[in-house]
Amino acid sequence: MKLDQRSAIVTGAAGGIGMAIARRLLNEGASVLLADLDRGRLDAASNQLQLDTRAEPKRIASAVCDVSREDQVAAAADAAIAAFGHWDIVVNNAGLMLFKPIEEQTAEDWQRILGVDLLGAFFFIKQAFLKMKGGGAVVNVSSVHAVETEPLVAPYAAAKTALLSLTRSAALEGKPKKVRVNAVLPGAVDTPMLWDNPNVRSGAEIINKADVGTPDDVAAAIAFLCSDDAAFVWGAGLRVDGGRLVRL
């Protein structure tokens, strides 16, 4: 297994893509701390992952964490070190989206989205640079909305675009620390976030079923970027979209 002896934090880990990422990292040998907002959902996810992977209980931990709060991010990093003895990987997967015309958006809307989708990643990268003493890997979950987008999601698209810029800057500063920083850009993934999208429900955005991936597809790409197989990959943005953006 590619991630034996590694320990990871996965944010937004109580369901969807985050839970698939945690499952893949566990199956690759890593110990994983699940970070999410709700204790009940975290406990349910931990129990399910233990059943799915048959991992030893000591390899799964959890922490309630609002990634937009720097103090809670620091506490989650410390919790991973306390649980596993070291911290080697963080996957910044937590994300928030809203659907609203620009003229109806408020400063609070923007602050809420940027707080989770951008600042949350910044806070964890900062902690990684401070606490990954032997080096490590950071993977930021951006989106194809960073490249092409649709109406009503301006704060989300802006945050995901900025996250790619943060990835490049952090890769430069992380290199002397031996902390690799990369990003993935998922396309349409079979999760409630996709099917609850009002643009999809209304038909304003047409989803070709051939372009819809699974959470496991995203998790596989992230596991690669976390592993030594990606040792020469720094500051990259890997599209995981089934080729959706290459079609004219």
Image (cartoon, rainbow, N blue to C red):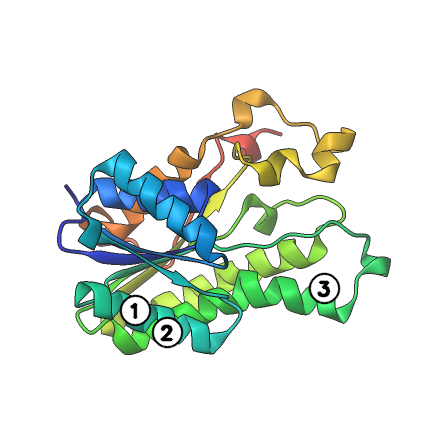
* Residue drawn at x 24%, y 37% as measured from the top left: 53
* Residue 117: percent from left, percent from top: 55, 60
Mark 1 vs 2: CB contact within 8 A: yes
Among numbered discs 2 and 3, the one appearing first in the sequence: 2
Gap between marks 1 and 3, in whole Å?
30 Å
Q: Secondary structure at mark 2?
A: helix
For label 3, count other residues whose C-alpha is less than 10 Å away and answer few (under 14), some (14-19) or many (20+): some
Q: Which mark, by number, is residue 22? A: none
Q: Residue at x 19, y 54 (%)?
A: 58
What secondary structure is found at the residue carrying circle 3?
helix
Residue bearing mark 3? 109
Q: Which mark is residue 79?
A: 1
Q: Considering depth in this image, is 234 or 142 the residue closer to the camera? A: 142
State the separation of the CA atoms marked 1 and 2. Answer: 6 Å
User: Which quadrant would the N terminus be assigned to in this image?
Assistant: top left
Locate residue 14, reporting x and y percent.
44, 48
Query: Quadrant of the rendered structure where residue 148 is?
Result: top right
Looking at the rendered structure, the secondary structure element under dot 1 is helix
- Residue 73 visible within the image: yes
